[in-house]
Image: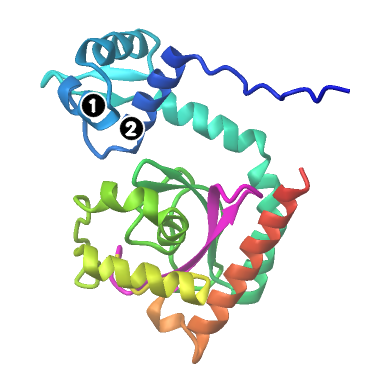
Amino acid sequence: MTDQVKKEPKVDSTLSKGLSILENLAAAQKGKGVTELSKELGLTKSNTFRLLQTLTTLGYVKHGEDKSYAATLKTWQVGRSSVENLNLRELAAPELTFLSQETGEAIYLAVQENLSVIYIDKVDSQKPIRSWNAIGGSAPLHCVGTGKAILAANYDRIRDQISGSLDRFTDRTLTSLDALDRDIEATKSRGFAYDTGEFRNRILSFGAAITLPSGETVGALGISLPDISLPENGAERYGALVAHAARSVSSKLSRI
């Protein structure tokens, strides 16, 4: 009997190139020109320009007055729909409730959008002194617990992109790549991210990434609280709690 050779599926080169442009722009902090994109992706300028025109016509890319191109919110909407289809909010709801009951603090479910996180669900703190963010609110990846957890899980891919976007928000913000490198290593070592007041003064947060079986990160859970509310040894306890909750949601995703 002759063994059948399994054929690799054919990949449409035009579609592949178009998606590579869209992924590049979606991850960028600012718009890019045809020349810059063509060099980064190894495409000809004419091919890059044609693909950008198609993406612009379809509404996924916009052409700025400075002749640069940037991803539109339509790209984010498609990504958000994918998250919704995973039922991430429904799957993570018990873990949000668990973290709220264990800590009494504000609990967040966040997903990545470019170099930021977007909060897609939350449980508010009932304490008189509390942290607060709205659903739909955002924060830079390098400043908050959920963002740093996602960043750590994808650091090899995102490091170069974020290196020029380390804006300062407080005197604790990590604004150098060396400092961020050390923080990411610490995050990976302990299993959770810790924001020491890097986005808002005296507001702490802890975060852990939610992943698919493939290792792809789809979001993160976070605990946020004023620094005066952190109990003794609270950093280790809250970090362990959020890491445990994120693993629980990831386990559910592996069974879908």
Horizontal and vertical percent for residue 68?
A: 17, 23
Q: Mark 1 to mark 2: distance in Å?
A: 8 Å
Residue under label 2: 24
Residue under label 1: 37
- Dividing the picture into quadrants, the one containing residue 100 is bottom right
Q: Is residue 108 visible?
A: no
- Looking at the image, which residue is at 62% across and 20% down? 9
First to last magenta residue range: 199-225
For disc 2, the neighbor class at 10 Å (few under 14, some 14 to 19, many from 20) is some
Does residue 38 sit above or below 130 in this rendering? above
Residue 39 forms part of the magenta stretch: no
Residue 221 forms part of the magenta stretch: yes
Secondary structure of the magenta portion, mostly? Answer: strand
- Looking at the image, which residue is at 44% across and 21% down? 16
Q: Is residue 31 visible?
A: yes
**Mark 2 is on which residue type?**
Asn
Q: How is the image coloured?
A: rainbow
Left or right? Give the position of 12 relative to 181.
right
Does residue 135 sit above or below 192 in this rendering? above
- Looking at the image, which residue is at 64% across and 60% down? 96
Horizontal and vertical percent for residue 250?
A: 66, 55
Looking at this view, name the residue that lies furthest to the bottom: 232
- Looking at the image, which residue is at 50% across and 70% down? 192
- Tag 1 near tag 2, CB within 8 Å: yes
Does residue 121 sit above or below 131 in this rendering? above
Whichever of labels 1 and 2 marks the residue nearer the N terminus, that label is 2
